[in-house]
Image: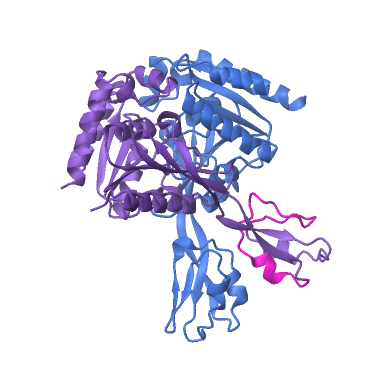
Amino acid sequence: MLKQVAVVSGKGGTGKTTITASFAALAHDMVIADCDVDAPDLHLLLHPQIVKTQEFKGSKLAAIDRTKCIKCGLCKESCRFGSINDSITIDSLSCEGCGVCVIVCPEEAISLKERISGYNFISKTKYGTMSHARLNPGEANSGKLVTLVRHNARKIAEEEDLDLILIDGPPGIGCPVIASVTGVDAGLIVTEPTMSGIHDLDRALQLLNHFNILPLVCINKYDINRKNTEKIVKSCEKNEVDIAGKIPFDPTVTEAMVAGKTIVEYSPENEVSQEIKTTWKRVLSVLNK
Amino acid sequence: MIISIASGKGGTGKTTVAVNMALSLKDVQILDCDVEEPNVHVLLQPKINETKPVYLSTPLIDEEKCNRCGKCSDFCEYNALFVTPEKVLFFPQLCHSCGGCMLVCPKNAITEKNVEIGMVKTGVAEGVELVFGELNVGEPMPVPVIKAVKKQIESNKTVIIDSPPGASCPVVESVSGSDYCLLVSEPTPFGLHDLKIMVQVLEGLKTPFGVIINRAGIGDKKTYDFCEEKGLPILLEIPFQRKIAGLYSRGIPFVVNMPEWKRKFQSLMDDIEGLMKC
């Protein structure tokens, strides 16, 4: 049966991608999905060879026919996103393509046009097939693009008869995160023992709880503040949340990133690599329970 | 003057820069627009004076008046309405609150009701005024909460805006309208990759910007090469130091224990003002 695990964090920069890339190198027979579509980094470690590229048309954009427009301003008054200015031109960044301006225009001067908001890719990596995407800078609709990336990942899993999808999620708790975690079998929250990390972990746990997703926690750089690590461990024990791993701080992780390699391959004997292996085993055992 | 702080990649030090800068300057208002995971208040520990809910207007359908014609669902670009022969199904999490369904309904069967999606909190700490938003857990759309936070801007002050990570609509909403943007990066391949994406966003917005390199000393030199090639000013470097990381982990802004840094943030502000004049 197909299993899906998402690596998320709440707070950005806790090490999601470093850990996901290592999981990909350790796991066999899985599909990789990079669901951080507005600032994707997984490809910098996994070096995918793109096999298929598709345009992503996430939303529409209002377009005004200058020859018909009488500048009555009704469209501007009706737009709730403030996307039409005094000279009756559309601000493409804030326009959400709702179509209200189209119906209020007495001259039928406005229409909705499809816009390309990004691209999604199917690629080969040495660890398995990867589904990923790139939202154009500043665009909206990252949630929809994430859904498409996951849809493609499921199709690949079916075609290749694989039963695991590994998802690298975006930071935060909003639409792209919700789209990354809905329906997964487990969510691994990567946190760090800082006050901000603890605050954001709490909200990420609430999110997984809200969507009935089994949470697992991994404390990255656990030794930079052992007191805070202890706090996280105690709070997880109290809430019966499984700690899947504790990974130490080590500058070798950055060295591996600079070399464009996963830490488990760059320095397999390193304690970080050993701990990531242990964490991955835990995740797998929880998934297969 | 409104200065926003963004990064692309998460965890590069946006909040650290925003808070330490705020504590080094006078007459400052700081806005936390990372409403999914706000952290400024974790570092500033403000006394909260006011909490206001943020509402989204969503359709309320009068089933008595509705004749299931389906015009509302045909209109809705977000598929938030679905009309069955018996009733109209509404999916609030897909609704963008455009109000179009109300306009197209021939039976005037649609009105609106307010749904709470988050909070805006206002407080003070160390003479710094703080406004931060919190998106309710499970709600998908941060942008209306960000807009509500930005409504509180007091433009006679120095306004510092802490943006969310990423490079999509919430970041654009946070940064747009600022006079200057500081991009906080770390000198690693991930940091550089996401910095390049943010540079494209800011070029699109036509907002002037400069770069701050945090954790200087780790990684490689490619971020510096990129800034040089692009002619981007590197306005400040914060070295990778265990002391700074340790203070951050305990939730302490480093200028509190390392007051010599206040001068550096003041010069940073002077540099921005200088750059704005040219």
> Residue B156 appears in which quarter of the rendering?
top right
Check residue A45 for magenta coloring: no
* Residue visible at 42% across and 20% down in the picture: A259
Q: Outermost residue toward the left? A: A289
Q: Position of residue B226 (x, y in %)?
A: 60, 22
- The chain painted blue is B
Rendering coords of residue B72 (x, y %): 55, 75
Whether residue A80 is visible to the viewer of this picture, yes or no, is: yes
Check the image and report above or below for A35 versus A66.
above
- Chain A colour is purple
Residue drawn at x 43%, y 49% is: A149
Range shown magenta: A81-107
Q: Residue at 32% across / 55% down in the picture?
A: A183
Say if A70 sits above or below B202 in the image.
below
| Residue for point 28% across, 55% down | A212
Q: Position of residue B173 (x, y in %)?
A: 59, 46
Q: Judge whether A253 appears above or below A92 on screen.
A: above
Q: Is residue B222 left or right of residue B1?
A: left
Placement of B17 over or under B145, stated as above or below: above
Taking the magenta stretch, the answer to whether it contains residue A101 is yes
Identify the image quadrant of residue A238. top left
Main SS class of the magenta portion in the image:
loop
